Image (cartoon, helix red, strand yellow):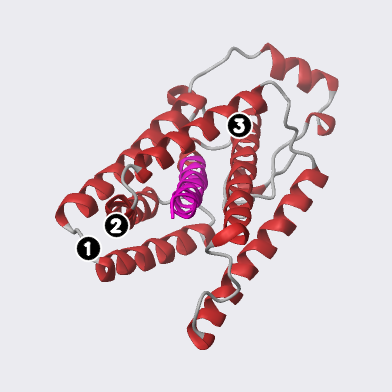
């Protein structure tokens, strides 16, 4: 099934934009296909799970480098942190609209996003001791739980599942934008989605949406490997997973802060 992940869909997970489906092949071609020996990425130039793991590790490692820089070298520099966040956002948008992955863009996004997270996490830690550690552990737990559920087929990424999840996601983002506008021009807490009971509910919804995007990432990786996507598209898989994990971490961090106020 083709995923509706806005970052990964149609961005190189099939060579030439389309892939031959089993129904398009003759019986003789299918027999020849199944008779071929398995080959690794180094032999075929195709996407493999090992390639995805390696590039995801490199991307998340770059995020960690940025976090350490932001935490230890740029404490309380919220202006610089916001600048890093803007740069990360621009790099993510550029990569999202490219037809082929760029390791430089992916790693650049990871670094600047890490700087932003480092400064922000230290600020949260000073106000709510231990909140970043709790958020990291929660993010890891959600990732592990979603992976287990996906592998056990407790979660099935159907077309209906994707439509509902994406519709809720768009509504969620729209609510954030409206809240920012109300806060900027009306003052106060805007729609009130950052504090109190409504804030808690909104954070929980955000975490669930992050888990939803993880499931799309898993489906896209599985499809890419099965269809023989080019090896370079492993960077897109790493990029998508990093975006989802950062989303979940930020929502968890905000939820912990609200609960401990």
Residue 168 percent coordinates (x, y): 71, 57
Is residue 142 at least partly visible in the picture? yes
Of the 4 image quadrants, the one containing the C terminus is: bottom left
> On the image, numbered disc 1 is attached to which residue?
76
Residue 164 shown left or right of residue 111 in the figure: right
For marks 2 and 3 on the same chain, the one whose residue lies earlier in the sequence: 2
Q: Which mark is residue 146?
A: 3
Q: Residues within 10 Å of mark 1 (few under 14, many from 20)?
A: some
* Residue at 60 percent of width and 31 percent of height: 146
Q: Residue at x 53, y 63 (%)?
A: 195
Q: Which residues are magenta?
A: 236-261
- Disc on res. 123: 2
Quarter holding the N terminus is: top right
Q: Which of the 4 image quarters holds residue 224?
A: top right
Q: Magenta includes 252?
A: yes
Q: Is residue 83 above or below residue 45?
A: below
Separation (CA) of disc 2 from disc 3: 29 Å
Check whether the beta carbons of the residues at disc 1 and disc 2 lie within 8 A of each other. yes
Q: Residue furthest bottom?
A: 185
The residue tagged with tag 3: helix, strand or loop?
A: helix
């Amino acid at each position: 099934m083709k995923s509706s992940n806005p970052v990964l869909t149609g961005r190189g997970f099939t060579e030439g934009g389309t892939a031959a489906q089993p129904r398009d092949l003759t019986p003789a071609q299918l027999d020849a296909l199944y008779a071929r020996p398995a080959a690794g990425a180094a032999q075929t130039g195709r996407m493999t799970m090992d390639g995805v793991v390696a590039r995801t590790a490199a991307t998340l490692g770059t995020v960690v480098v940025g976090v350490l820089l932001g935490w230890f070298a740029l404490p309380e520099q919220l202006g610089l942190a916001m600048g890093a966040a803007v740069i990360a956002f621009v790099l993510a948008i550029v990569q999202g609209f490219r037809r082929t992955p760029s390791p430089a863009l992916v790693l650049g996004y990871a670094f600047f996003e890490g700087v932003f997270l480092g400064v922000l996490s230290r600020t949260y830690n000073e106000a709510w001791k231990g909140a970043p550690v709790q958020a990291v552990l929660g993010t890891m737990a959600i990732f592990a739980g979603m992976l287990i559920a996906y592998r056990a087929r407790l979660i099935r990424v159907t077309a209906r599942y994707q439509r509902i999840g994406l519709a809720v996601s768009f509504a969620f983002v729209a609510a954030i934008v409206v809240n920012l506008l109300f806060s900027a021009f009306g003052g106060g807490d805007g729609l009130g989605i950052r504090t109190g009971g409504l804030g808690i509910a909104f954070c929980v919804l955000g975490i669930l949406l992050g888990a939803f995007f993880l499931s799309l990432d898993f489906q896209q990786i599985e499809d890419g490997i099965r269809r023989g996507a080019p090896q370079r598209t492993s960077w897109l898989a790493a990029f998508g997973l990093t975006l989802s994990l950062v989303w979940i971490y930020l929502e968890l961090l905000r939820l912990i802060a609200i609960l401990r106020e």
